[in-house]
Amino acid sequence: MPGSGKSYVGSLLHRKWGMTFVDTDHLIGGREGRGLQEILESHGEAGFKRLEEEAILALCAINPKKAVIATGGSAVYSEKAMNALKASSLVIHLDAPVEDLKANMEKDGSPNERGILGLKGKTVDELLRERQGLYEKYADMTISLAGSPSEDQVMAEIMAGIQRKTGGLEMLEITPPHPRWVFRQ
């Protein structure tokens, strides 16, 4: 979901922990040779979801180590892609309040005209309600962003969760609407 901060967090993890950062939106845009909004308008929602699923499956197939992968919000609509991530990864759901998502989107333009929101004609609230069950279904753990925790607090909680679940860090994936992190051993 737009405004979740996935690219910011991915860049932060890249800088702090030296992890490779891959944003599937940029990967798709580069492969198609145009911006995401243009891709969405020409391929439609179903076509874009297919491209997103293909990108995730390709990344899982090459099994990058110590990587941060930011996926688009509609990734959770693909059971195949999410199962591929869950099969070898730890998915962490960052639960951001909808007001924070809206505020972040306002900084970049109209929150109801960006990405899938513009195609579906839905509000941020409606799209979040539509997807929330899927985010919960695929999450191995949830970190609340209510109250605006500091970067250091969020990173410490992520690392504690990784250590509890895996004993180490090799892959990280951020999937909106709230960043979701997947760590692969």
Image (tube, rainbow, N blue to C red):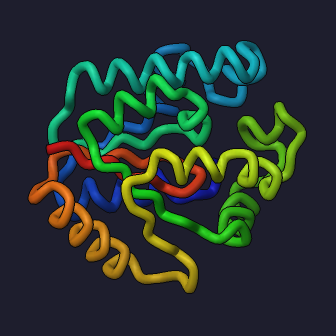
Residue 148 point in image, percent of width and height: 53, 82
Q: Quadrant of residue 68?
A: top left
Outermost residue, right side: 121
Location of residue 99 (image quadrant): bottom right
User: Residue 44 lies in what quarter of the image?
Assistant: top right
State the residue lying farthest toward the bottom. 147
Q: Position of residue 92 (x, y in %)?
A: 39, 57
- Report whether 23 appears left or right of 34: left
Q: Position of residue 81 (x, y in %)?
A: 44, 27
Residue drawn 67% across and 63% down? Answer: 101
Residue at image location 84% in from the left, 49% down from the top: 112
- Is residue 59 rendered to the left or right of residue 53? left
Q: Residue at x 25, y 48 (%)?
A: 183
**Image location of residue 48, percent across then percent down:** 64, 21
Q: Is residue 153 above or below residue 8?
A: below
Give left or right: position of 107 versus 74. Answer: right
Give the total of numbered labels. Answer: 0
Residue 8 appearing in the image:
yes
Q: Is residue 164 left or right of residue 113?
A: left
Q: Is residue 66 visible?
A: no
Q: Quadrant of the C terminus?
A: top left
- Please name the residue shown 46% across and 17% down the image: 54
